[in-house]
Amino acid sequence: MESGDDQRSRKDEAGADLGGEDAAKPRGFSKETSVVWSCKTSAKNPAMIFMRAVDAAQNGVTQTGERSKGCVFPMNRRHLPAFLALSAALCLAPPASAAEPVLSGIGAAMQEMVTKNEIAGAVTVVVTKDKVLHLESTGRADVEAKRPMTPDTLFWIASMTKPITGAAVLMLQDEGKLNVADPVAKYLPEFANLKTPSGKPANLTITQILTHTSGLGEAGGPAAKEAKTLADLVPLWLAAPMQYEPGAKWSYTQSGINAAGRIVEVVSGLSFDAFLQQRLFDPLGMKDTTFYPTDAQRARLVTAYSRDKDGGALTPVPPRAGYEGKRDRPPQGNGGLYSTAPDYARFCQMLLGGGTMDGRRFLSADAMRFLSTPQTGDLPTGFFQNETFGQHGKKYGWGLGTSILLTPHEGVAAMLSPGSFGHGGAWGTQAWIDPTKGVAYVLMVQRANFPNSDASDVRRAFQEAAVKALGAR
C-alpha cells in the first residue's frame, strides 16, 4: 500500500494530479517560471506563496536562486504580474478534500446522510491488500466549531478493537506461546475455581472467551470504574455469576475479550497496549491508533453526537464513561481503542493480504483461519437476531474477535460476499473485509444512538455506493 505521504507527494493541495513536474506545467511556461510553478504545487499553503510573491514584487526580488523559505522566485520581473494572477487563482481553489483517490458516488451518499442528520460527517476508505482505492472525508468533525472532517480525524472505534485483540492472541499462538484451545486457567489461575450456573467446573477456553460463548459474568459497579489495569478486573469477572453454561449459546460478552487481553499481558510480559504498539501498530504504520490519545491527537478528535428522536437534530454527547482514553484506565481489548480511517485500513489490508503487509508476515495462514472462518459451530450469532433486524442469526458465525457473514441478506449485507468478516463499533464505525472481492470497506462516523450500528442506513449507503463504483471501474 502507498502511504498517505507518498500519495500526497504527487498531488497539490487543491487535489491536482501532478504526475511529475512536466505534467503539471501549463504549456508555454518557461523553465524559469516552471520553478515557481513547482514551488506552488509543493507548498503546503498556496496563500502564503501568493503573499511571498507580492512581497517579492514590492521589494525587488529579482535574482535567480534567491529563496523565501524554500520558494525560488523568477529573475525577470516582467513575469511577476502573470505569476501573481495565477497564484491568486490557485489560492481561490476549493480546499483539497479530494487529494486522495476517490470512488464516484460515495461522497454523495455520505453527504445525503449528513443532510438527513443521520451523522455530522464521515471518513470512508476502500482498499485492496496493496492499494488505497478510495479515501474521502465528508461533513464536519465538529458542527458548532465548523471543523471539517479530515482523513486524520480521530475516532473512538469501540468494538472494532476486538479483531485487533483476536489478532494479538493469534500472534502468540503462532509463536507457540499459547493455544486458543487452552483453558483460560492455564494463564489466569484464578479461573480454576470458576463454576457454571449448574455448579460444574467452567473450564473456559481462550476460544470461548473470544467468541462470546463463554457465559462469563461482566464486571460492574464502583470497583469496575476504579480499575486501573486489566489485572484489576479479573476478580470482578469471577465475582459476577456466570450467565449460562459455556458453549450453550452466543451472547455478546465484554469481559471475555478483556480476559483475552490480560492473557496477552501474562504470556508476553508486556502491558496489552505496549504489546499492540510494538507488535502491530508501529510495524503497520498505524501511528494514530491508541488507547491513550495524546494532546495533539485529541485536537483531531471527532465530536460525538446523538440524534434527537423527535426533530432529528444532532446533539453533542461526551465520551462513553470508561472509554475516555485516560491513562488511569485499563487498555480494554473489548473497545478501548481510538484510531483514524487510514490507520484501521492498514490493519484491514494486512488481513486481506492473508496476514502479510509490505513483505512482513504478522499472522500465519492458520491464524487467519481463526479470524475468517466460524469457530461457533451452528450457533446463531451476531446483532440481527430479532424481528426488527430480520432474524439473521444463522447467517453469521463468529471467529476470534470477528463477525463472519455466512449468507448475505437484504440491507447492509446484500452487497458483501459470503465469508466477509469484520466488526462494527457502538458509535457507528464499521470495517468489513471481503476476501472474495479482494477489498475492505472502512467507515468512520461518531453517533451515539444508532438503534443498531451494524444495521445503520449510513453503513448500507456507504457499502452500496462503494460496490457500485467498483463495479463500474
Image: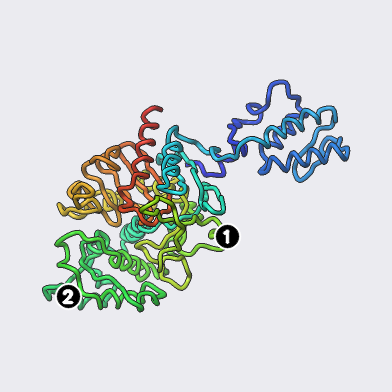
Residue sitting at x 20%, y 52%? 385
- Identified by mark 2, the residue type is Lys
Q: Which residue is mark 2?
A: 195
Residue sitting at x 77%, y 41%? 51
For the residues labelled 1 and 2, the Cα–Cα distance comes to 46 Å
Q: Looking at this view, is 445 or 165 the one in front?
A: 445
Residue sitting at x 73%, y 40%? 49
Question: Compared with residue 193, is residue 379 higher up or lower down, i.e. above or below?
Answer: above
- Identified by mark 1, the residue type is Ala
Determine whether, in the image, residue 324 is placed left or right of residue 405.
right
Question: Compared with residue 198, is residue 106 higher up or lower down, i.e. above or below?
Answer: above
Q: Which residue is mark 1?
A: 296
Q: Position of residue 365 (x, y in %)?
A: 30, 48
Q: Looking at this view, is 128 or 124 the one in front?
A: 124
Residue sitting at x 30%, y 76%? 236
Characterize the local packing of mark 1: few (<14), some (14-19) or many (20 or more) Cα atoms within 10 angstroms: few
